[in-house]
Image (cartoon, rainbow, N blue to C red):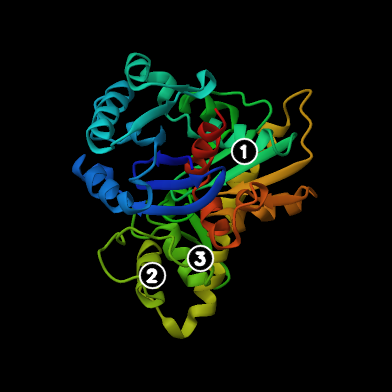
């Protein structure tokens, strides 16, 4: 039996997947606040060991090199590769985007091919199963949008220009980076441009935040209750919360959530506007998959989540969708 482990090493989460003889048997998302120090990766890897420690091959992709603890993206990739080599036993294969999988030494000599290439792994896994698909992968911090058969940008800088990367996510994004004003009780209200509340707070107020996807502390260190979430949101309005007017606040929160979805939809429209591109369906991924499926509906395109597309077992389908790049590198390496 061949066991392949897939890793997507991010600046906020470590995502891991276990594939046995081509079938997904385990998948996890583990909090990894790398901005607090490289030791956070050690902690996350230790938590992942019971699920993937016995794998014969460990396939790795990453985005964590962008974390502010590193002086540059190149330095981040090299530091992360070294840490992974020290902590993982067994054969390691590094995903280098269009160059496919490489060994550790080759990856260290070509760090920019390794940097933030995880979206290409997901796209490749989708393209062989459902051609002419558009991937929308909304994570906690960012959203990837790409035509899986014809990705355009390769670096984050390029993809921010092409619309293929929208720096907004389901939970960690600060509210004022989404909207600087919102309606409140029939009037427009300017918002303080400070990180009092996040989109996780907005979704808790709306009752739309999926279970077990918000793994990080709140901005003020207080609880994740609706009341505390409302207090953080209201602070950005320069106001105190009033739970008895929750419906009024929910109308404001709904506007903010719609503004965020609109920014992703704008990226989608930019991507699909490329000449000669034909899109027949949408594949949603990430913890924000239920939210972004609304874009497929607006575009009158059929949508399927990543977990269903890869025929993941029912008990793993949701988290396969949430952790698509980790699952993708495991599946791709298993076929390599």
Based on the displayed image, in which of its 4 quarters is residue 63 positioned?
top left
The residue lying furthest to the bottom in this view is 244
Marks 1 and 3 sit apart, C-alpha to C-alpha, by 24 Å
Determine whether label 2 and label 3 are within 8 Å by CB: no
Closer to the N terminus: mark 1 or mark 3?
3
Residue at 75% in and 43% down: 281
Determine whether label 1 and label 3 are within 8 Å by CB: no
Q: Closer to the camera: disc 1 or disc 3?
A: 3
Q: Residues within 10 Å of mark 1 (few under 14, many from 20)?
A: many
Residue 62 visible in the shown view: no
- The percent coordinates of residue 218 (x first, y second) are 31, 62
Determine whether label 2 and label 1 are within 8 Å by CB: no
- The percent coordinates of residue 98 (x first, y second) are 54, 20
Closer to the camera, 325 or 284? 325
Residue carrying label 1: 267
Q: Residues within 10 Å of mark 2 (few under 14, many from 20)?
A: many
Closer to the N terminus: mark 2 or mark 1?
2
Closer to the N terminus: mark 2 or mark 3?
3
Residue at 59% in and 54% down: 289
Circle 1: element type:
helix
Residue carrying label 3: 210
| Left or right of residue 217: residue 118 | right
Residue carrying label 2: 229
Marks 2 and 1 sit apart, C-alpha to C-alpha, by 28 Å
Closer to the camera, 171 or 219? 171
């Amino acid at each position: 039996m061949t066991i392949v482990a897939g890793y997507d090493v991010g600046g906020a989460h470590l995502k891991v997947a276990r594939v046995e003889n081509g079938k997904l048997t385990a998948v996890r998302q583990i909090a990894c606040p790398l901005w607090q120090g490289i030791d956070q990766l050690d902690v996350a890897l230790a938590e992942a060991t019971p699920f993937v420690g016995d794998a014969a091959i460990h396939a790795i992709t990453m985005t964590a090199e962008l974390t502010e603890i590193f002086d540059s993206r190149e330095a981040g990739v090299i530091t992360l590769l070294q840490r992974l080599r020290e902590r993982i036993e067994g054969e390691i294969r590094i995903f280098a985007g269009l160059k496919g999988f490489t060994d550790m030494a080759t990856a260290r000599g070509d760090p920019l091919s390794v940097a933030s290439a995880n979206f290409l792994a997901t796209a490749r896994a989708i393209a062989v199963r459902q051609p002419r698909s558009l991937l929308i992968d909304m994570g906690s911090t960012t959203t990837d949008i790409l035509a899986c058969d014809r990705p355009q940008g390769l670096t984050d800088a390029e993809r921010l220009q092409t619309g293929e990367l929208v720096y907004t996510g389901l939970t960690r994004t600060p509210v004022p980076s989404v909207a600087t004003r919102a309606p409140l009780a029939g009037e427009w209200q300017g918002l303080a441009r400070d990180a009092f509340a996040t989109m996780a707070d907005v979704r808790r107020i709306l009752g739309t935040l999926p279970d077990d996807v918000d793994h990080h502390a709140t901005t003020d260190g207080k609880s994740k209750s609706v009341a505390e979430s409302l207090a953080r949101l209201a602070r950005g309005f320069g106001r105190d919360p009033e739970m008895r007017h929750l419906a009024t606040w929910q109308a404001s929160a709904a506007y903010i959530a719609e503004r965020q979805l609109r920014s992703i939809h704008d990226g989608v429209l930019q991507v699909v506007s490329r000449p000669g591109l034909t899109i027949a369906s949408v594949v949603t991924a990430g913890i924000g998959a239920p939210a972004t499926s609304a874009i497929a509906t607006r575009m009158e395109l059929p949508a399927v989540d990543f977990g269903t597309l890869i025929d993941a077992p029912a008990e793993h389908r949701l988290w396969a969708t949430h952790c698509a790049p980790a699952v993708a590198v495991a599946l791709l390496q298993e076929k390599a």
